[in-house]
Amino acid sequence: MKKVVHLTSVHQRYDQRILWRECCSLREHGYDVTLIVNDAKENETLENGIKILSTGFVPSGRRQRMTEGVQRVYELGIAQNADFYHLHDPELLRIAMKLKRQKKKVIFDSHEIFGEGIKGKEWLSLFSQLVSFSYNAYETYICRRIDGVVCPTSYNGENWFEGRANHFAYVGNFPRREEYRNSKSVPYFQRRNVCFAGWLDKERGILTMLQAAKMANTRLVLAGRFESDQFFKEFTAADIHHIAEYVGVLNREEIFDLYSQCAIGLCTIPDNGGQRFKLDNFNTKVYEYMSAEMPIILSDWPYKRKMVEKYRFGLVADPSDANDVAEKIKWLLEHPAEAEEMGKNGKQLLEERFTWDVAERELLRLYSEIE
């Protein structure tokens, strides 16, 4: 039985893409799978045999995570003496060649187009272009020397890793069929709230969504983790309780119960000078909205506009324009029959095109090619 170790210095142990999709698929198809993470929780073995090992280390910040956090993940990972090492964070690229020198098969899982995304990072300020260029060059150097690369999307219609990877697979962030939930459903015509679930920060347009909800005379329900304590304090201190409700971090059952009570799912995330408007995919939350049969308001970018026009599962709006987002919210609330039909179209699209079965085949093909 081939042994696979997935390494992450950034993500939590129960990450949907890493654990519940990729690790589980590999385990179901005969691989011995271990996931290594940085956290303070106990080691555990899941019912399906996947082992989760913790370094016992919780970094105090980005710098410590990228230095000591990476080193601890590497040391625990190499101690497992696996055949494959599957790296999930760009900061782990610096251990890729160490693994290759020990005759290991190495795969880099690029959850995003990181080099382009760097351009939109405010904390890098004026240096973002230089850092982006440097990262792309470094990423290319490493990817050409390891065994394979995984990415969830093409970029402006092209494979970002074309000519930069020995083996490649598109592995989308599609949900497993068993992830769908039959929640306590409220009849659609009775729903008035809109919702956003995910990472809560200014870069994801939360403030614009709040303004749009107020202008549309509706209520915005937010679920997920706040970017920082400071932003959480700003949010809770603001006089917005009549237009917004924060329901905290929800588990899978709770999040689908929330969706079953909301009329619209929002994903109007701004680009902020980065990569997002060129990506040919959807955020994970969009697939969740689809599974809950909610119409969706998306950022008005080329791929999203094309898909919405073709499959009619929602509307697009300028993510930087609260008035435009509000107008789209109002239209859907004022046309419940059309909105409900859009939700059904989204569910059908999900089941026909965006299921994990498709992504799993690509993942398994990649592993088979590099064995």
Image (cartoon, grey):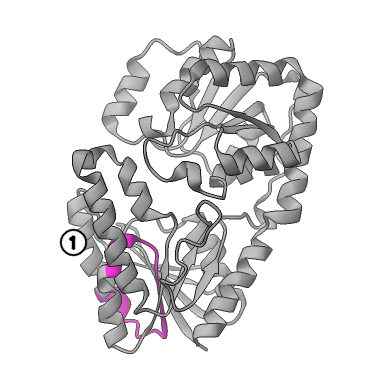
Q: Quadrant of residue 215?
A: top right
Q: Residue at x 56, y 19 (%)?
A: 324
Q: Depth check: give the residue in front, 12 or 49.
A: 12
Residue 327: percent from left, percent from top: 61, 16
Residue 190: percent from left, percent from top: 74, 19
Residue 99: percent from left, percent from top: 30, 81
Q: Depth check: give the residue in front, 28 or 41.
A: 28
Up-down: is 141 above or below 278? below
| Residue 92 inside the magenta-drawn segment | yes
Residue 355: percent from left, percent from top: 68, 57
Q: Quadrant of residue 114?
A: bottom left
Q: Quadrant of residue 328?
A: top right
Q: How many marks are shown on the rendered structure?
A: 1
Q: Depth check: give the residue in front, 116 or 64.
A: 116
Q: Is residue 307 left or right of residue 300?
A: right
Q: Which residue is mark 1?
A: 67
Up-down: is 85 above or below 81? above
Q: Residue at x 49, y 23 (%)?
A: 209
Rate crowding at label 1 as few (under 14), some (14 to 19) or many (20 or more) other CA atoms within 10 Å.
some
Residue 27 showing in the rendered view: no
Disc 1 marks a residue whose amino acid type is Thr
Q: Depth check: give the residue in front, 186 or 284.
A: 284
| Residue 136 inside the magenta-drawn segment | no
Residue 315 showing in the rendered view: yes
Q: Is residue 173 left or right of residue 79?
A: right
Q: Kindly state the secondary structure of the residue where label 1 is placed.
A: helix
Task: Give, as a single range, the part of the protein colored magenta.
Answer: 75-93
